Image: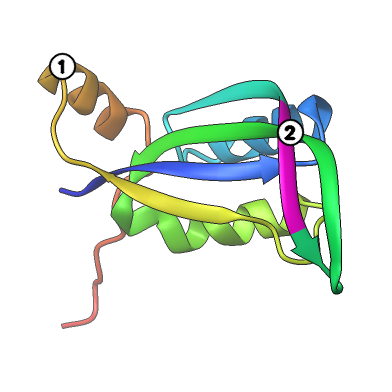
């Protein structure tokens, strides 16, 4: 099973909290962490932007990434939200077992 960190930038702590709650409540991630007050520098519409943002980091499984991304996009105010995943190479097996238990069960096809 592939475990992932999902890195998301949000316009502020309130948006990060709302998205984090929605994703965890849907069991698409076991946990969400918010780091507020990040300075972001980026290009948008041919203009250099400097903004405060909040970082949302979620711990999930690779097979849930597509559904997780769609949930984030449905709640996010950005036209193109940053939702990127990084693999978790290793970790405390007790924690990884908890992560499995707290996320949505993998869908099993009944078509034979």
Q: Residue at x 80, y 57 (%)?
A: 78
Q: Is residue 40 magenta?
A: yes
The majority secondary structure of the magenta stretch comes to strand
Q: Is residue 29 visible?
A: yes
Which circle's residue, 2 or 1, is located before the other in the chain? 2
SS of the residue under disc 1: helix
SS of the residue under disc 2: strand
Which label belongs to residue 94?
1
Residue 80: image x %, image y %? 72, 65
Does 111 sit left or right of 17 as displayed? left
Report the front residue among 9 and 101. 9
**Residue neighbourhood size for the residue with mark 1, other residues' Cα within 10 Å, grouped as few (<14), some (14–19), many (≥20):** few
Residue 70: image x %, image y %? 60, 62
Q: Residue at x 81, y 66 (%)?
A: 44
- Specify the quadrant that holds the C terminus: bottom left
Does 87 sit left or right of 25 as displayed? left
Question: Which region shows up in magenta?
Answer: 38-42
Q: Number of numbered discs present?
A: 2
């Amino acid at each position: 099973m592939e475990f992932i960190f999902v890195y998301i930038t949000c316009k502020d702590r309130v948006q990060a909290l709302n998205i984090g709650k929605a994703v965890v409540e849907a069991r698409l991630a076991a946990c969400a962490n918010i780091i507020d007050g990040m300075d972001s520098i980026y290009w948008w519409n041919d203009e250099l932007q400097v903004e405060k943002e909040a970082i949302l980091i979620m711990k999930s499984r690779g097979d849930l990434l597509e559904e997780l991304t769609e949930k984030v996009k449905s709640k996010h105010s950005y036209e193109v939200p940053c939702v990127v995943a990084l693999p978790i190479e290793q970790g405390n097996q007790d924690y990884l077992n908890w992560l499995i238990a707290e996320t949505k069960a993998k869908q099993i096809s009944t078509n034979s």
